[in-house]
Amino acid sequence: MLLGGWDVVYDIVGIPATLQHALRWARAGGTVVLIGAHLRPMQLDFTPVRFQEVRLIGAIGHDVVTWQGRVMSTFELAMAWMLEGRLRTDSLLTHRFPLDAYREAFLVATIHKARTRSVKVAFALIEGDFTTH
């Protein structure tokens, strides 16, 4: 366990290894927010929860909220913020490929992910609307 650590750690993957790391990286009295979904039972060491009083809470991926007097889904709100430029996502799309380069795209997104540092890999469906990295 870390001495110190973070106030809040978000586990957006949700597999046993990432959740175990998240519990150990949170400071004493900190919080781990489990967002990712692992659809099988897990075995975890809950020592940080017991001895460091780390809180583990779950979060659903979306909600319905009221924003500026309007009721909307959080997906709709996120899209509105992106269109307004309030939420920047440019750096998340790290690689684009033409559809016929699907083999290379899948390698970049999976096996070579550590080397290529891919975050989001997409296919460009319009000719000339791609750059490969």
Image: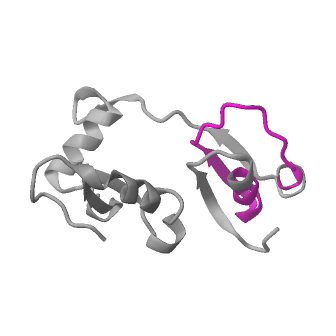
The quarter of the rendered structure image containing the N terminus is: bottom right
The quarter of the rendered structure image containing the C terminus is: bottom left
Residue 44 painted magenta: yes
- Horizontal side of 23 relative to 90 (left or right) equals right
The correct choice, above or below, for 25 with respect to 38 in the image is below
Of 105 and 92, which appears nearest the observer?
A: 105
- Horizontal side of 107 relative to 101 (left or right) equals right
**Quadrant of the rendered image containing residue 91:** bottom left
Of 59 and 107, which appears nearest the observer?
A: 107
Of 122 and 52, which appears nearest the observer?
A: 122
- Horizontal side of 127 relative to 22 (left or right) equals left
Residue 104 location (% of width, % of height):
38, 60
Residue 27 painted magenta: yes
- Residue drawn at x 34%, y 60% as measured from the top left: 92
Residue 109 location (% of width, % of height):
45, 57
The answer to whether residue 96 is seen in the rendering is: yes
The correct choice, above or below, for 68 with respect to 107 in the image is above
Residue 128 location (% of width, % of height):
9, 59
**Quadrant of the rendered image containing residue 129:** bottom left
**Quadrant of the rendered image containing residue 40:** top right
- Residue drawn at x 47%, y 35% as measured from the top left: 61
From which residue to which does the magenta span run?
19-48
Residue 64 location (% of width, % of height):
37, 26
- Residue drawn at x 73%, y 60% as measured from the top left: 21
Q: How is the image coloured?
A: one colour
What number of labels is visible? Answer: 0
The answer to whether residue 88 is seen in the rendering is: no
